[in-house]
């Protein structure tokens, strides 16, 4: 098992790491990004996820499952072009959940599971 930390502020506070490689998969924790709106936060969260997958020896095209969490489901549609560009050629199974996030400034949180490179 391999644990990957991104140094995010909540990792130490809550006792988790950005990603864990185990059982042939890379499990990336729910990830928020910085930015003034949902699309900027979406892009930044995907960048952080991409970096974690790279550290784990995987990549975005190996993502098999993605969960999107938003406090307001009406903000999801502006993210669709970003997500289609990211996953379009290799679409994972996906779920969108409307829920509260850890801080009201966050408009989207993204969690993925990817195949580990040695699988």
Image: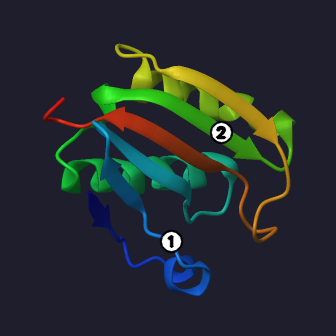
Residue 117: x and y in percent read: 16, 35
Residue 12 position (above or below residue 44) = below
Dividing the image into 4 quarters, which one contains the C terminus? top left
**Foreground of the two, 91 or 28:** 28
Q: Residue at x 31, y 65 (%)?
A: 4
- For disc 2, the marked residue is 68
Horizontal side of residue 117 vs 37, given as left or right:
left
Residue with the most extreme bottom position? 13
Q: Secondary structure under badge 1? A: loop
Dividing the image into 4 quarters, which one contains the N terminus? bottom left
- For disc 1, the marked residue is 16
Residue 106 position (above or below residue 91) = below
Picture quadrant where residue 118 is located: top left
Residue 53: x and y in percent read: 29, 48
**Foreground of the two, 11 or 87:** 11
Residue 10 position (above or below residue 64) = below
Q: Secondary structure under badge 2? A: strand
Q: Callout 1 environment at 10 Å: few (<14), some (14 to 19), or many (20+)?
A: some
Q: Callout 2 environment at 10 Å: few (<14), some (14 to 19), or many (20+)?
A: many
The residues bearing labels 2 and 1 have C-alpha atoms spaced at a distance of 19 Å
Residue 94: x and y in percent read: 60, 24
Q: Residue at x 85, y 35 (%)?
A: 74
Q: Residue at x 76, y 46 (%)?
A: 70
Q: In front: mark 2 or mark 1? A: 1
Q: Residue at x 54, y 33 (%)?
A: 66
Residue 89: x and y in percent read: 35, 13
Horizontal side of residue 73 vs 3, given as left or right:
right
Residue 69 position (above or below residue 61) = below
Q: Which mark is residue 71?
A: none
Residue with the most extreme left position? 118
Horizontal side of residue 102 vs 89, given as left or right:
right
Task: Name which of mark 2 and mark 1 comes first in the sequence.
Answer: 1
């Amino acid at each position: 098992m391999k644990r990957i930390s991104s140094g995010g502020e909540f990792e130490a506070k809550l006792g988790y790491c950005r990603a864990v490689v185990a059982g042939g998969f890379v499990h990336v924790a729910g990830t928020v990004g910085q930015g003034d709106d949902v699309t900027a936060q979406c892009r930044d969260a995907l960048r952080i996820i991409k970096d974690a997958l790279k550290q784990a020896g995987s990549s975005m095209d190996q993502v098999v499952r993605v969960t999107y969490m938003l406090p307001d489901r009406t903000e999801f549609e502006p993210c669709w072009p970003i997500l289609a560009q990211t996953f379009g050629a290799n679409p994972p199974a996906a779920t969108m959940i409307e829920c509260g996030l850890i801080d009201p400034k966050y408009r989207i949180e993204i969690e993925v599971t990817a195949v580990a490179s040695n699988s």
